[in-house]
Amino acid sequence: MAVRSIYRGLRKNNLLLPLRNTGSHLHSHATSFGFKEVREEDKSQLVGDVFTKVASNYDLMNDLMSGGMHRLWKERLVSKLNPFQGMKHLDVAGGTGDVAFRIREGINGAIIRHRAMRNDLPDETKIFVCDINPNMLNVGKKRAQERGLGDDKSLVWVEGDAEALKFEDNSMDGYTIAFGIRNVTHIEKALSEAHRVLKRGGRFLCLELSHVELPIFKDLYDYYSFSVIPALGDLVAGDRGSYQYLVESIRRFPSQDKFAEMIAEAGFQKVEYENLVGGVVAIHSGFKL
């Protein structure tokens, strides 16, 4: 799995803030919702409706659609982060807690290497799980309870918008977003907000379904995406439309190289990406220096 470096040198404790309104001055423009064109101000609600529908079956469908591989992809994402004791981390679009739990385990693992195992993390460690959809957050909170982490003070659940984060400038050591950034209305705003909240030296990591380049594999992947995934959604969740949107949104997302350029344009340096499974997913990385 080759890691491609895209950096082009384009640009050399109270963490919560009131919600910023960054879009009120904008005129209405069209944007994509899958293959459809919709008004920008309508996309957030449409995406919200999708995730409200899929929340209860989200984990099961991820396992079925990826053959369980999404778990390995998230492990790879967290391994690049190198979580540490006392860090302040922001996981955006992470309502179900999948990535946050792995980060917590990574921090606990680092502590275990130095002293006896403990189930609670030091008070200064904070993992903020931010999601715009309260139904997804409720799934994550329920999973935390099931893991015995319902009262864990290191996990902080925040309803919020990736394009207008409720956090102070230079307040986070790390930022992750897994399978979420293609759903925002303005990707460049989400990237700008990620850069704003990170401290100097902080790392941005994005795991996202991406673009397959090998012709034969691409044909197979397209068939699976457009024929199998919506049918699975219909069979398991009784919801073909939401999973049709899923596969269409992947095709509308920028290519790996284009997205890397967008990350660099947001101010990040040392930008690179790693393709997994031939480009079915990609992990993009950048640092605020």
Image: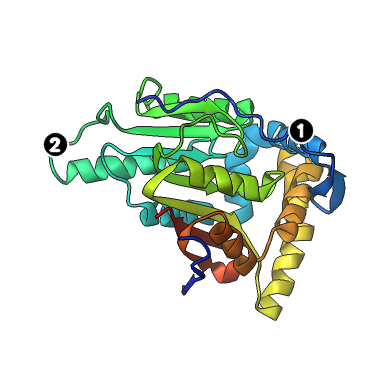
Quadrant of residue 135 in the image?
Answer: top right
Residue occupied by mark 1? 45
* Quadrant into which the C terminus falls: bottom left
Q: Nearer the viewer, residue 37 or 96?
A: 37
Q: Is residue 14 above or below residue 235?
A: above
Q: Nearer the viewer, residue 128 or 165?
A: 165
Q: Residue furthest left?
A: 115
Q: Callout 1 environment at 10 Å: few (<14), some (14 to 19), or many (20+)?
A: few
- Residue pictured at 20% horizontal, 41% vertical: 111
Q: Residue furthest bottom?
A: 215
Secondary structure of the residue carrying tag 2 is loop
Quadrant of residue 183 in the image?
Answer: top right
Q: Position of residue 141 (x, y in %)?
A: 49, 26
Identify the mark at residue 116; answer none if there is no mark.
2
Q: Position of residue 20 (x, y in %)?
A: 61, 29
* Amino acid under disc 2: Ala
* Amino acid under disc 1: Gln
Total count of labels? 2
Residue 68 shows in the view: no
The reply, left or right, for residue 78 in relation to residue 165 is left
- Residue pictured at 65% horizontal, 78% vertical: 214
Q: Position of residue 260 (x, y in %)?
A: 57, 63
- Residue pictured at 72% horizontal, 35% vertical: 23
Q: Callout 2 environment at 10 Å: few (<14), some (14 to 19), or many (20+)?
A: few
Q: Earlier in the sequence, mark 2 or mark 1?
A: 1
The reply, left or right, for residue 43 in relation to residue 19 is right
Q: Nearer the viewer, residue 36 or 162?
A: 162
